[in-house]
Image (spheres, grey):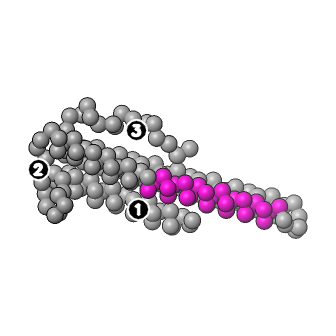
């Protein structure tokens, strides 16, 4: 997967998260697409549940994009190193090819980590905005568990 495809995927995830947050921040959206006022305790809790679902979907999409990028980086590195060690033009050419393979790999991994971190933060931010708009008791939120997620080593 190229850097452009990774960035495009991450932007798509971010836009989806932001659109979802906007809908929730406006007080919720009914099936007919009209705004609804969140009033009863049950509807407030259901609203938070919907916000959690949107957050989890965004995080799932972001982690899939991240793992695809990591897999692509490792595959490209394996191919590049294989080609480097197949060279017969001398040690300096081999060293140069090895250095290039690792440099490209490191850059790809950095991009993947940064994209994951950005998407993850956007999903949690959108969730917090949406959950706040639900006006549900803070005690029903699972935000305290955010640190349990993969950090994008």
Magenta segment boundaries in residue numbering: 61-85
In this figure, what is the number of numbered marks?
3
Sequence order check: which comes first, mark 3 or mark 1? 1
Alpha carbon separation for disc pair 1 and 2:
30 Å
In the image, residue 138 sits, relative to residue 2, either above or below, namely above
Whether the residues at callouts 2 and 3 have beta carbons within 8 Å, the answer is no
Q: Quadrant of residue 74?
A: bottom right
Residue ID at (39%, 35%): 145
**Nearer to me, 30 or 24:** 30
- The residue at which mark 3 appears reads as 146
- The residue at which mark 1 appears reads as 11
Number of other residues with Cα within 10 Å of mark 2, as a class: few under 14, some 14 to 19, many 20 or more: some
Dominant SS of magenta comes to helix
In the image, residue 62 sits, relative to residue 132, either above or below, namely below
Which label lies toward us, 3 or 1? Answer: 3
In the image, residue 142 sits, relative to residue 77, either above or below, namely above
- The residue at which mark 2 appears reads as 37
Give coordinates of residue 62: x percent, y percent: 45, 54
**Nearer to me, 62 or 105:** 62
Left or right of 78 in this view: 38: left
Sequence order check: which comes first, mark 2 or mark 3? 2
């Amino acid at each position: 997967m190229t850097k452009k495809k990774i960035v495009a995927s991450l932007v798509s995830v971010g836009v989806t998260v932001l659109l979802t947050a906007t809908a929730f921040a406006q007080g919720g959206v009914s099936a007919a697409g009209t705004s609804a006022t969140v009033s009863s305790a049950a509807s407030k809790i259901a609203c938070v549940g919907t916000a959690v679902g949107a957050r989890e979907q965004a995080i799932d999409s972001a982690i899939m994009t991240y793992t695809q990028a990591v897999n692509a980086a490792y595959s490209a590195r394996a191919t590049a190193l294989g080609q480097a060690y197949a060279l017969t033009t001398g040690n300096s050419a081999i060293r140069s090819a090895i250095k290039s393979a690792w440099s490209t790999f490191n850059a790809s991994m950095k991009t993947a980590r940064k994209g994951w971190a950005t998407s993850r933060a956007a999903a949690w931010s959108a969730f917090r905005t949406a959950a706040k708009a639900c006006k549900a008791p803070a005690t029903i939120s699972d935000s305290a568990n955010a640190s349990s997620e993969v950090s994008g080593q």
